[in-house]
Image: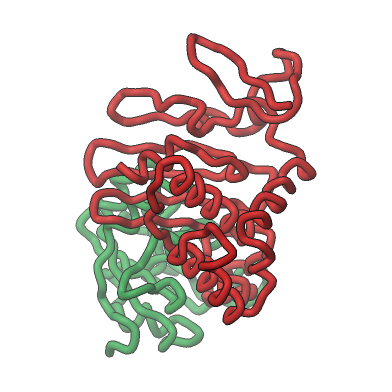
Amino acid sequence: MPTLEKESGRQYRRFGWSIERSEHTGVEGLGRAHRSVCERGQTVPKDWFVVRGPLPKRGEWRTTAHWSKEIMGDWLKRSPSERRRTSQTQSRIPQNIAEAIISSRGILDLSENWDDQGSSGYEEDTWRRACDFLVRHADFARESLGRDLPVPRILPGPQGSIDVHWKMPRFELLVNIPKDASKPATFYGDDFGKSSIRGNLNPAEAIPGLIVWLLT
Amino acid sequence: MWPKEDIPDNASLFMRIHKRFILAGDVGPHAFRDHARGMSVDWDKYSTPQETRNRARIASDNAVISLVAGAVRAIEPLVVEHAPIQDNSFEEGGNPLKPNRAHSEVIGEKTTEVRVKLSRTWRWQLRLGEQ
């Protein structure tokens, strides 16, 4: 079972099975960018974003797929018309989020050099992880906070990654889901003023702090 | 051979934007990315927006925006460098490159933060289909 660790009076989220503290040194190669900070001088609670300990192994990440299947049924495999017909009745996904996901599937049609400047194409696994990330957060917002998440744009990012981008009148947030599933997603957001957030996150987990930030 | 020159902060840099990067008349942070060494732009001292667009394989698929060199340099850790493409130059794959005295590069990692900030600094020069 996942364990929780107390450190400096604050609880931190950990993945996987209980491991020795000496192994619990963070994700290799992430460096200082692995910490989430707020430019107002406050440290964002680490359990919002930071993966302590190793990222889940590939098999563990597959729980995401089971989870999303539970919510979405197998609608991603259905035809667009079937998805439209069933998305309101059989799924808890907000309709506008489902539409954003469906319309973004065209990203998978982009082949190598699609922009005539050498950009690479996109793998379905990357797109699905981006969709899972979005669905998970939309579901958390609805189930836990009774609110609907603003609808982002799902966009073809650099080097085969997928961008999830909220550009709202009061704030902007960009989350980048990398092609390499073993790497964390990166994010940056601000309110066009002094307040900003940045860091890394595990796209396979709902990040309550990020949702609260999006909704306030 | 064209010399490498210093690009002043008040210079404009023209950048091609493929139509797939344009959504509802907006250019998002996903458009700002590296190609090979950096993000390719053309210095306005040696190029017009039309010339920048016409360097694309399919010019009509592209719009052109401009960035101000000083505004780009204000985003850490970006650096703007003049990098003229000389005669008889080749890309990494061995394909010949067209000479381009205006060619410049925005060097530095395009993190999510950098891309968001770049997406707030541009202006339209040529929209899709505009002459």
Residue A151 sits in quarter:
bottom left
Q: Percent x, y for residue A165? A: 42, 56
Residue A26 in sight = yes
A94 sits left or right of A72 in the view:
left
Q: Percent x, y for residue B38? A: 49, 57
Q: Percent x, y for residue A201? A: 54, 39
Q: Residue at x 51, y 44 (%)?
A: A186
Residue A23 sits in quarter:
top right
Figure colour of chain A? red
Q: Residue at x 26, y 52 (%)?
A: B71
Q: Nearer the viewer, residue A25 or A148?
A: A148
Which residue lies most toward the front here? A89
Q: Residue at x 43, y 65 (%)?
A: A96
Q: Nearer the viewer, residue A132 or B95?
A: A132
| Quadrant of the image containing the N terminus of chain B | bottom left
With respect to residue A100, does A2 lie above or below?
Answer: above
Residue B105 sits in quarter:
bottom left
Q: Which chain is green?
A: B
Q: Percent x, y for residue B66? A: 28, 67
Residue B89 in sight = no
With respect to residue A191, does B129 lie above or below?
Answer: below
Which residue lies most toward the top here? A8
